[in-house]
Image (cartoon, rainbow, N blue to C red):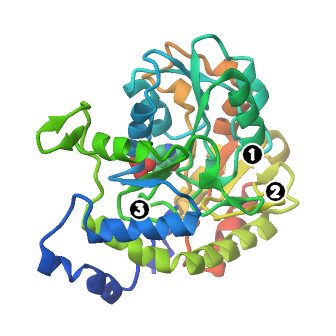
Amino acid sequence: MSENQRILVTRSSMPPLQEYIDEISSLWDSHWLTNMGVEHQKLEASLKERLGVENIALFTNGHNALECILEALDLPEQGEVITTPFTFASTTHAIVRKNLVPVFADVKIEDFTLDPQSIESLITPRTVAIVPVHVYGLPCDVEAIQQIADRYGLKVIYDAAHAFNVKLGGRNIATFGDASMFSFHATKVFNTIEGGAVCFKDSSLYPVLNHWKNFGIVGPERVVYSGGNAKMNEFCAAMGVCNLRHLDDEIAKRKMVSERYWTNLSGLPGVRTFQPSAGVEYNYAYLPVTFDPDLFGASRDEVFEALAKNDIGARKYFYPLVSDYERYRSVYASERTPVAQRAANTVLTLPLYADLTIENVDRICSIVKSCAR
Ligand SMILES: *Cc1c(COP(=O)(O)O)cnc(C)c1O
C-alpha cells in the first residue's frame, strides 16, 4: 500500500520492452555501438522531420550540446552572455566553462522567462550573445529577443531543454534564434535515457559540431579542435527512436493530468498556475505553482513539507537561483533580479507524468488546499 502511495515528481517514459528489444537487436549483427551508427542516423532523421528543422546534431546529453554550440559559434573569449538566473545549473555552467561571462537579467512575472527589457539595459560593448531559457516549456518572447539581438549584432542560443515539441504560432520552438539546445534526459518529456541535441540555423555548423563532439578529429590524420567526447551511443538513440513513436500519446496524457491540476487549483487565493498563452502548442513538461504566503496563508516551503509528509515528492524547481549558488554568489547579487528571486522563493513543481492517475492528482491537490489557513 505505502509503496503504491508514494509519488515522485516525475517518472521516465519507456516504450514496451519488446519494441526496444526489436530496435536494438540488429546491433548484435553489426557490433557498431556508437560513432554515428544506424540508430543515430535514424533518430537524427526522425527528429528533423518531427521538429521541421534543417539542421540538428545529437549529443550524449543536453549540457554537452550547449557547450558544443557555444564552441562552434566561436564567440570571443570573455565575451558577456546575457542569461537568466532562474534555470538549472547547466545553462550558466556551460557559459562559464566556455570562458564566457554570464550576466544575469531578470525574468517576466507572467511566465518566468527572460524579460526583454531587462536584457536591453545590460548590453555593453562586450556583449556577444543571449542565452534565454524556455522555462517549463513556456516559450520566451522570441520576437522581442530577436529584435534586440539584431539591433546589437548578438547571437541567440536558446536553452530549450524543457521545450521539446512546443510550437509557437504553428512554428516549432526549435526554429527560433541561431540555435536551440534540447535535453533528452530521463526526466524530460522525450528521453533517450541520457541525450540531447542542438538545432541550428547555419548549416555549415553541422560538421563543426560533429568534430567538437568527437575530440576535434576531422580526419584520420587531422585534429583541428580541442574537442571533448559528446557522442550519442546506439542504445540511447534506439530508445529515442522508440519513445518518439509514443510521444503524442504521452503528451496527450500529460495534458489531461495538467488540466486536472489547473481545474483543482483554480480560484485559490494566492495560488498561481502557469497555463500556456494562446498560440502555444504546449508539451505539458512541468506543473509549476506559486504560493503567495500572505494570500494563501502558507509558504511554498510549508506546502513542500506537507506533501513530503505524505510521501509526495514535489520539487523547488528552481531554487536557489543560480546567482545564489555558492559558486556564483560572491560575484552576483540576486537582489538585482527581484522577479527571479521571488519566483525562486515561491515556486513548487508538482508531480507530473503521463501515467499519474486523476485520483492521485486529486489527493495531491487536497493536501495542497489543506495547507491554506
Ligand atoms: C535538463 C536541463 C539541462 C541539461 O540537460 P542534460 O541533458 O541533463 O545535460 C539544461 N538546462 C535545463 C533548463 C535543463 O532542465
Q: CA distance from mark 3 to mark 2?
A: 27 Å
Q: Compared to 273, does 190 lie above or below?
A: below
Identify the element where label 3 is drawn.
loop
Q: Which residue is mark 2?
A: 277
Q: Are marks 1 and 2 in contact (CB under 8 Å)?
A: yes
- Write the residue at 37% across / 57% down: 195
Q: Position of residue 184 (x, y in %)?
A: 44, 59
- Write the residue at 68% across / 18% down: 336
- Identify residue type, mark 2: Ser
213 horizontally vs 30: left or right: right
Q: Is residue 318 visible?
A: yes
Q: Residues within 10 Å of mark 1 (few under 14, many from 20)?
A: many
Q: Which residue is mark 3?
A: 186
Identify the element where label 1 is drawn.
loop
Q: Position of residue 196 (x, y in %)?
A: 41, 54
Q: CA distance from mark 1 to mark 2?
A: 10 Å
Q: Which residue is mark 1?
A: 111
Q: Compared to 271, does 1 lie above or below?
A: below
Q: Is mark 2 within 8 Å of ligand 1?
A: no
- Write the residue at 50% across / 80% down: 246
On the image, which quarter does residue 343 sit in? top right
- Identify residue type, mark 3: Ala
Q: Nearer the viewer, residue 347 or 339?
A: 339
Identify the element where label 2 is drawn.
loop
- Number of the front mark, 3 or 2: 2
